[in-house]
Amino acid sequence: MNRVSRIRVAKVDKVKEGQTIKFSFHRNEKPQEGFVGLYQGKLFAYENTCRHIPITLDYGDNRFFDTEGKFIMCQTHGAIYEPDTGLCTRGPCAGASLYRLEIQEEDGILWFEEGSLS
Ligand code: FES
């Protein structure tokens, strides 16, 4: 049976433009990592898994944006993803999308509900 719990991700005002915050959750009892970020004033959250090979996008260093801060980039083979849609527009997984995570804001806190995963 899947455990369902609500995870406190971050205070909303701690998520700064062009930056990301990582958090941990479980999918089917397996530990996973997600990250939330802000791009052009809009929050986004994705699972920290590249669509090319299922490894993390960062090297464990919370570096997701490219040097210009315009795209999310897989550090291993350089796949480029749009921050707002999660769509891979360049690289070995072009056309695939990052797994979006639904984040909810409540009283200035961002929450993620593991039960919302399929
Ligand atoms: S694992 Fe991300 S582009 Fe290859």
Image (cartoon, grey):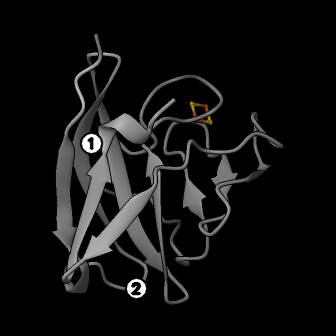
Residue at point 75%, 35% (across, down): 93
- In the rendered image, is residue 86 in sight? yes
Residue at the far right in the pictured view: 95
Residue at point 55%, 60% (across, down): 72
Q: Is residue 111 above or below residue 74?
A: below
Q: Nearer the viewer, residue 37 or 107?
A: 107
Count residues near mark 2 (Cα–Cα under 10 Å), then give few for <14, some for 14-19, many for 20+.
Answer: some
Q: Position of residue 30 (x, y in %)?
A: 28, 17
Q: Position of residue 49 (x, y in %)?
A: 48, 35
Q: Quadrant of residue 20?
A: bottom left
Q: Quadrant of residue 40?
A: bottom right
Report the side of 13 relative to 76 (left or right): left
Specify the amino acid type for callout 1.
Gly
Q: Position of residue 82 (x, y in %)?
A: 67, 63
Q: Nearer the viewer, residue 66 or 9?
A: 9
In what quadrant does ligand 1 lie? top right
Q: Secondary structure at mark 1?
A: loop
Quadrant (top left, top right, bottom left, bottom right) of the N terminus: top left
Residue that numbered label 2 is attached to? 17
What label sits on residue 83 in the rendered view?
Answer: none
Residue at point 55%, 78% (across, down): 68
Q: Quadrant of residue 74?
A: top right
Residue at the far top in the pictured view: 1
Residue that numbered label 1 is attached to? 60
Q: Secondary structure at mark 2?
A: loop
The CA distance from mark 2 to mark 1 is: 20 Å
Specify the amino acid type for callout 2.
Glu
Beta carbon of the mark 2 residue lies under 8 A of ligand 1: no
